[in-house]
Image: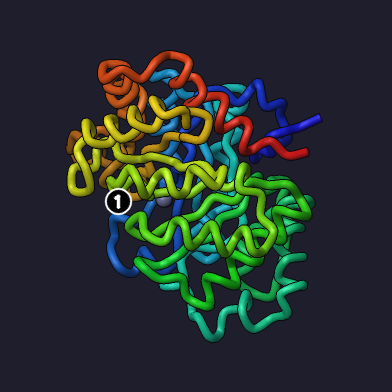
Amino acid sequence: MAVIRTILGDIAPEQFGACDFHEHLIRSSGPELAINPWYDMSDVDAAGEELQDFIDAGGKSMLLMDPIGCGRDVPRMLEIAKRFEGKAHLVMVTGFHKGGLYDNRGHWSVICPQRQVVDMLVKEVTEGMDIYSYAGPIVERSSARAGAIKAGTSNQMITPFEQNALAIAAQVQKECGVCISTHTDMGTMGPETLKVLKDNGADMEKTVLCHTNKMKDTNYFLRMLDTGANLCFEGADRPMWATDTECAMNMLYLVERGYQKQILLSMDAGRNVWQKGYMKKEGKIVNGISYMLTDFVPLLRKVGVPEDALQDILVNNPARVLAIG
Ligand SMILES: [Zn+2]
């Protein structure tokens, strides 16, 4: 029987509910924090407020997209998952981000034998995620297992480091049946990412490309969707990349052409300045993760996306791509 592997254990896919398919609640270390303090998201209480707000808006589940070496914090996420037991289903990832966030010559994913790297990531899915996220030589597995694997690519380029990580992700998927979800930088290199994954035996139907909405190019979307792969849109509340209406109209375009089974939705609020839980403490008003359900989904309805498509995008598609076994 197929299951979705949450932080607190396996559940039936029908229990998963309305999902934010690319999200961040905790990021407590990693190279991004050194670039800008807005990437610091290490406050369990603030994250809990944000999650509660999402639940109050009708949300139920999230795929947390912080991979190894980029601030993934298994103990803090376990704490949040336990606080929300029975109220939210949280899934974490193993795998890697884009190459720019690692030492591309010295990182263990490239200097160690690929077979052994695959085995380490498989164990995160089958046995438990390392509480230190493989930051050093000491490994201590937690009760929380990874439910998907991440990989990433650069802006208009897939580097050798990234090709290796994509090959590893495909292999882990073949061995454990997990969904592959990738970061495409500025939305570029989507079709090329799919080709590398496919050449390595990945299942396109269990592959999701994130951020490609930033390209705002309908023919570009079709090139990827026609391989059978899925696209996760996160255009809401990001006016520097697209207006909400532009994003909604692009989604409508794809739904009208029959692709509603291959579209997912997220906020990707991966900065503290995009979350109410953090900004409330500073007296600032922001939209937060719940905006996806309180404002963007009603906009999708308004432009003509039918209810059955919304049900697929929010509930059925996430459950299908994350189902293991
Ligand atoms: Zn993200």
Give x and y (percent) for residue 318. 56, 33
Give x and y (percent) for residue 143. 73, 46
Give x and y (percent) for residue 16. 60, 26
Residue at image coords 64%, 83%? 111
Q: Is residue 230 above or below residue 163?
A: above
Name the residue carrying label 1. 215
Tell which of 44 and 302 is nearer to you: 302
Amino acid bearing label 1? Met
Give x and y (percent) for residue 119. 77, 65
Q: Quadrant of the N terminus?
A: top right
Locate residue 220 relative to residue 295 in the image: left or right.
right
Locate residue 84 relative to residue 28 in the image: left or right.
right
Q: Quadrant of residue 4?
A: top right
Q: Quadrant of the C terminus?
A: top right
Tell which of 3 and 230 is nearer to you: 230
The outermost residue toward the top is 307
Answer whether residue 46 is visible to the viewer in this image. Answer: no
SS of the residue under disc 1: helix
Answer whether residue 296 is visible to the viewer in this image. Answer: yes
Give the class, few, some or many, for how many residues have Cα within 10 Å of label 1's Cα (few <14, many ≥20): some
Q: Quadrant of residue 277?
A: top left
Residue at image coords 48%, 43%? 225
Residue at image coords 72%, 51%? 125
